[in-house]
Amino acid sequence: MSRERLYLFDTTLRDGAQTTGVDFSLEDKRRIAEVLDGLGLDYIEGGYPGANATDTALFAARPRLANARFTAFGMTKRAGRSVANDPGFQATLQSGADAVCLVAKAWDYHVRVALGIGNEENLDGIVQSVRALREAGTEAMIDCEHFFDGYKGNRTYALAVARAAYEAGARWVVLCDTNGGTLPHELERIVREVAEAIPGSHLGIHTHNDTENAVANTLAAVRAGARQIQGTLNGLGERCGNANLTSIIPTLLLKSELVDRFETAVTPERLMRLTKASRILDEILNRAPNRQAPYVGESAFATKAGIHASAIVKEPETYEHVKPESVGNRRRVLVSDQAGKSNVVAELERLGIPIAKEDEGVARLLEEVKEREAVGYAYEGAEASFELLARRLLGEVPKYFTVDSFRVMVEKRHNAVGRLVTVSEATVRVFIAGGEEPLWSVAEGNGPVHALDQALRKDLGRYQKHIRDVELVDYKVRILTGGTEAVTRVLIESHDKATGARWLTVGVSPNIVDASFEALVDSINYKLLKDGATAA
């Protein structure tokens, strides 16, 4: 049986740029476009040429794409102007894009209130805009803004908008759930009804995630007849985000009900790049990846309980809905106070430490983990600290350096221009393996932990080359017990700018600075271990 083709349209560079706190540079957009193209998407929307300097520059020297059609976003011509006399429309038309996606009003209320024109004039503007693109040899698409609200308010007019675009020659008529308020059952019904008037092979779907239903709505639209899917990588977008292609793509390719009916340009080999693509975007945004993200999150294939871990080691396919490797992820069997020997053995094997379940070292390590977690340590989220602990018990971690002492001072004072500022200063005294003289380092920071981090990494002698690109990127503190003798747990995430690697370490102490410093020392030792540094 032949399968129907689905077309994937990514709007990360435009819709994603509307996310609070996101501001893509020109180089960011180029790099993201290349990553998306590597996945095998059909369309990559670059932005709105003429609307801002970044998007204009991107279209002036467009990225080199091997698979996707580079697409410009724009608006239908303005009321009261001809196509030739509308600068905004002309900027889009002349952008050199392979395809153009124009947004049009599909809700008669917006036509009346926002545009201040009549319904027929809006339809005429859509028709003229689509024809102008077609005459220029450009593939034309229309995003029907607030289509589902418009359809529920005035079914006849919303359909007229979609039909006008299609009959004028639009390759795709995209139905937009612009405020994200439509639920799957009603969205599927509406798309099915629209598909009776416009062929599904020309229908697209664009959903927002304001009710946490963007992915479900997208799949419902496909089931009802839509054959183009719009969304963003990692679900970026204004408010609560857009439909998450990072979840949609593997669902289409790996779930049998969908695989048997549909095909995309994303091959199994390209799908294996998905987790990396997701994390590259997070890296560009300087964000910690969402650990609970479906398919690509670090916890997506993680198991904590010992009874499940034992079964997963024997029959992983019965506990995981897809193979982690199919999306470029991996299985994680967490080590915690709920763990059994199977967890420990599975994690040691992943770390390249083959060991039999019956080996007494396994029982010793498990007991050590449970004793430490009883006083506050948590290794399920600090794999780097667990690896150090395991290898130390097996005698595989060299003693690279010893911290003889450290001191931190926090002072509030007036600076040189008379402004009252808070200054943190840290001093660290370290002995390097094989050295007889201590190394003293002093550094300032924007807080005591930052100052300690700067001081510790300021001078580690012959190990300095290994840590020069390491930075502290996340810092979490949890108070485990109350009262004056509270125990504090600190989780630190470190990042190697040269390789892109990230790792987490943990420290526990009644003193928050001491706990932080323990995690910092673990972080550096882990980096030296991974680099194969020697102690002699």
Image (cartoon, rainbow, N blue to C red):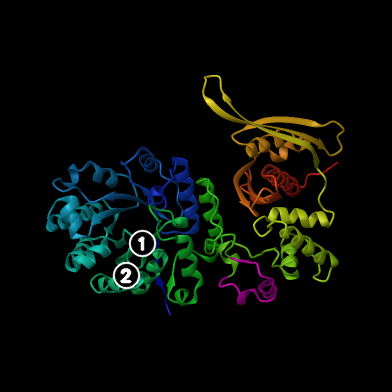
Classify residue 118 as left or right of residue 22: left
Residues shaded magenta: 301-322
Q: Give the camera-side residue of 497 and 76.
A: 497
Asked if labels 1 and 2 touch by Cβ distance under 8 angstroms, the answer is: yes
Classify residue 435 as left or right of residue 371: right
Residue 403 lies, with reference to residue 240, above or below; the image says: above
Callout 1 secondary element = strand
Q: Alpha carbon of mark 2 to alpha carbon of mark 1: how far?
A: 10 Å
> How far across and down, in percent of the image, does residue 36 sit?
47, 54
Identify the disc placed on residue 207. Answer: 1
- Say which residue appears at 23% left-offset and 41% top-offset: 87
Residue 314 drawn in magenta = yes
> How far across and down, in percent of the image, does residue 171 sit?
29, 61
Identify the disc placed on residue 113. Answer: none
Circle 1 crowding by C-alpha within 10 Å: few under 14, some 14–19, many from 20: many
- Say which residue appears at 56% left-offset and 71% top-offset: 322
Quarter of the rendering containing residue 163: bottom left
Q: Give the camera-side residue of 130 and 18.
A: 18
Residue 517 drawn in magenta = no
Which three-letter amino acid code belongs to the residue tagged 2?
A: Leu
